[in-house]
Image (spheres, grey):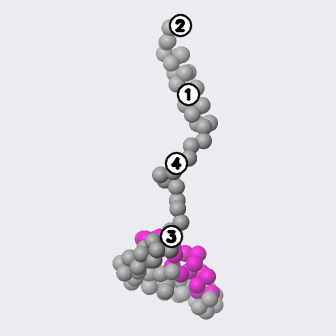
């Protein structure tokens, strides 16, 4: 059987389609939670290098809450900060606060 261009293209497309049906799990790129030791090291490094920026972000959040007449108690502020992360390093702002 002679392999012409049309046959080669259809075999290639069939191969691509069948490979798309096989689920792949990429272990090298999976996200793992930080261990307590690594989290402590990460936060220590983050807080020393971005501490002033984190303080600016937290004061900005507090100002926005005051503008929107949201209670700025410590518990409420911690709840809001827990839902936000630093755009530079990605750490949670409630952990950056302490």
Q: Earlier in the sequence, mark 2 or mark 3?
A: 2
Q: Position of residue 32 (x, y in %)?
A: 52, 62
The answer, for residue 53, to whether it is visible in the render is no
Residue annotated with mark 4:
26
The residues colored magenta run 76-94
Q: Which mark is residue 15?
A: 1
Q: Earlier in the sequence, mark 4 or mark 2?
A: 2
Separation of disc 2 and disc 3 at Cα?
59 Å
Which residue in the rendered view is the most extreme toward the left? 49
Q: Earlier in the sequence, mark 1 or mark 3?
A: 1
Element class at badge 3: loop
Q: Residue at x 49, y 12 (%)?
A: 4
Q: Are marks 1 and 3 in contact (CB under 8 Å)?
A: no
Q: Which mark is residue 1?
A: 2
Separation of disc 1 and disc 3 at Cα?
41 Å
Element class at badge 1: helix
Q: Residue at x 62, y 36 (%)?
A: 21
How dense is the environment of label 2, judged by Cα within 10 Å: few (below 14), some, or many (20 and up)? few
Residue annotated with mark 3:
35
Q: Nearer the viewer, mark 2 or mark 3?
A: 3
Decide if residue 93 is on the left or right side of residue 51: right
């Amino acid at each position: 059987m002679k392999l012409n261009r049309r046959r080669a293209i259809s075999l290639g497309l069939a191969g691509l389609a069948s490979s798309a049906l096989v689920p792949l799990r990429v272990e090298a790129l999976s996200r793992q939670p930080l261990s307590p030791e690594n989290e402590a090291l990460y936060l220590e490094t983050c807080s020393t290098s971005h501490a002033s920026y984190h303080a600016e972000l937290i004061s900005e959040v507090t100002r926005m809450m005051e503008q929107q007449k949201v209670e700025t108690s410590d518990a409420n502020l911690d709840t809001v900060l827990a839902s936000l992360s630093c755009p530079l390093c990605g750490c949670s702002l409630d952990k950056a606060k302490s």
